[in-house]
């Protein structure tokens, strides 16, 4: 009987140690999770939307070293999968004037005037020099038409309570190969210190601007529409 009692005691002691170990592991996991949540909170706080005071006719210009414009082209191979080809350039110049004030449409409105962005598309670079040369000389003919331009004389964007961040769709004049078309861009922009960070995206059909999508017979073809992606940083104009 004593031997049986000793066996039970040892078994219960072992189980208790396991429970304690599991509790320690659980507490460590909870601590790790809490630390991760704290880190996530820090990241979220760093992109917090601020409220701004009204301002009028502040001039900004594009910082080309921190900006880029590019294309995203779906490339279909014969009897194979789909690949997205990307090309970018940071040869960009541009400027605009910005005001933020009360308005009838919302709590506040952003007024953008004299917006013009110019990109040298002859300097577009992808992962293939052969492709870049063919785009310049054959398909897009950017060696002959090196400039793509997006412009808008005046744009009013309703703004919630003087927020420092906006997400909207704007329509402006896009000119490629000297053909000008009204083109919508989905944009996201925010103000951080003295700089404005702008992301934008749209899709176009190459035939709108007078050229066919690139293709190589019995090998591959690029599919319309082609994506245009912009990542711009603007600073106070000197």
Image (cartoon, helix red, strand yellow):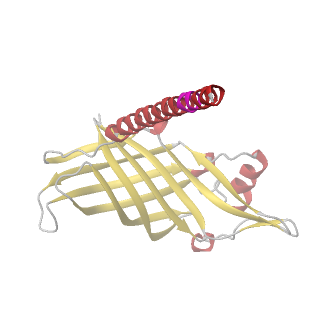
In what quadrant of the picture does the C terminus appear?
top left
The extreme right residue here reads 218
Nearer to the camera, 93 or 105:
105
Q: Residue at x 62, y 58 (%)?
A: 72
**Res 75 → quadrant:** bottom right
Please indicate whether residue 129 sits to the left or right of residue 162 in the image. right
Say if 203 sits above or below 67 in the image.
Answer: below
- Residue 103 is a magenta residue: no
**Measured along the vertical axis of the image, is residue 4 above or below residue 77?**
above
Residue 225 horizontal side relative to residue 112, left or right? right
Q: Residue 92: x, y in percent?
A: 48, 45
Residue 43 picture quarter: top left
Magenta-span inclusion, residue 14: yes
Count of numbered marks: 0
Residue in front for this viewpoint, 202 or 112: 202
Residue 122 percent coordinates (x, y): 62, 49
**Measured from the top left, where is residue 54 in percent x and y?**
13, 48
Secondary structure mainly formed by the magenta segment: helix
Residue 157, quarter of the rendered image: bottom left
**145 lies above or below 216:** above
Is 238 in front, or is 230? 230
Name the image quarter holding the N terminus. Answer: top right
- Magenta range: 12-17
Q: Is residue 30 left or right of residue 189?
A: right
Q: Residue at the location (73% across, 65% down)? A: 214
Q: Please state the horizontal and vertical placement of residue 42, each as a whole percent of the image.
A: 36, 35
Say which residue appears at 26% left-offset and 56% top-offset. 112
């Amino acid at each position: 009987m004593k031997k049986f009692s000793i066996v039970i005691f040892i078994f219960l002691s072992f189980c208790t140690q396991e429970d304690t170990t599991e509790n320690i592991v659980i507490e460590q996991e909870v601590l790790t999770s809490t630390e991760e949540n704290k880190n996530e909170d820090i990241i979220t706080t760093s992109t917090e939307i601020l409220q701004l005071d009204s301002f009028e006719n502040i001039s900004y210009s594009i910082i080309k070293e921190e900006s880029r414009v590019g294309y995203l082209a779906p490339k279909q191979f014969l009897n194979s999968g789909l690949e997205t080809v990307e090309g970018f350039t940071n040869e960009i110049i541009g400027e605009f004037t910005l005001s933020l004030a009360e308005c009838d449409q919302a709590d506040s409105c952003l007024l953008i005037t004299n917006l013009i962005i110019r990109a040298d598309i002859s300097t577009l670079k992808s992962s293939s020099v052969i492709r870049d040369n063919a785009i310049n000389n054959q398909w897009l003919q950017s060696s002959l038409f090196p400039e793509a331009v997006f412009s808008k004389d005046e744009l009013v964007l309703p703004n919630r309570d003087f927020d420092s961040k906006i997400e909207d769709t704007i329509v402006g004049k896009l000119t490629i190969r000297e053909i000008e078309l009204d083109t919508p861009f989905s944009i996201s922009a925010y103000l951080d210190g003295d700089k404005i960070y702008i992301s934008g995206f749209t899709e176009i059909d190459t035939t709108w601007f007078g050229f066919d999508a690139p293709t190589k017979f019995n090998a591959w073809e690029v599919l319309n529409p082609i994506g245009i992606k912009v990542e711009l940083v603007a600073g106070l104009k000197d």
